[in-house]
Image (cartoon, grey):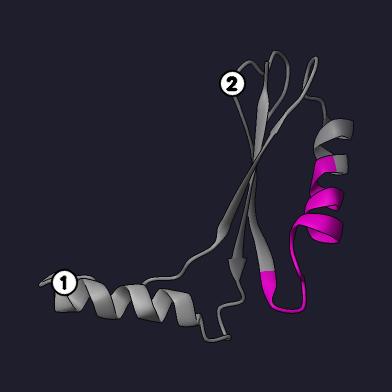
Amino acid sequence: MPTIVVEVMPKAELLDPAGKAVAGALHRLGHDRISDVRIGKRFELHVDGEVDAELLAAVEKVATDMLANTVIEDVVAVEVRGETAGASA
């Protein structure tokens, strides 16, 4: 069964308070080489049948319309994983 993975991240120009908190905690734990952390979301959509261009386009639309709050987030990746007979990612 193919899986389409959608990754959503906060827009680069916006502050990521959760990421800043994690980065601060990492520094307090001695991980000084980690300079920044940004926290996003990952969606895995399991689909029936072959992933074709039409399905991929539909998922990209769903990603921007429903999965991401496009005021503050960007869809940064939509890729196919798993059984993808005839599909391109």
* Residue 35 seen in this snapshot: no
In the picture, measured across the screen, residue 56 lies left or right of residue 41, that is right
> Front-most of 34 and 18?
18
Can you tell which mark lies on residue 82? 2
- Residue 37 locus on image (x, y percent): 37, 71
Amino acid at pointer 2: Gly
- Residue 30 locus on image (x, y percent): 10, 72
Q: Residues within 10 Å of mark 2 (few under 14, many from 20)?
A: few
In the picture, measured across the screen, residue 42 lies left or right of residue 21, that is right
Q: Which residues are magenta?
A: 59-73
- The C terminus sits in image quarter: top right
Q: Is residue 67 magenta?
A: yes
- Residue 81 locus on image (x, y percent): 59, 28
Amino acid at pointer 1: Arg
- Report the predominant secondary structure element of the magenta stretch: helix
Give the labeled residue for mark 1: 33
> Front-most of 9 and 53?
9
Mark 2–mark 1 Cα distance, whole angstroms, equals 34 Å
Q: Is residue 66 magenta?
A: yes
* Element on which disc 1 rests: loop
Q: Identify which residue is drawn at 16% across, 71% down.
A: 33
> Front-most of 85 and 1?
1
Q: Residues within 10 Å of mark 1 (few under 14, many from 20)?
A: few
Residue 8 versus residue 25 in the image, above or below? above
Residue 45 versus residue 8 in the image, above or below? above
Residue 39 versus residue 46 in the image, above or below? below
| Quarter occupied by residue 55 | top right
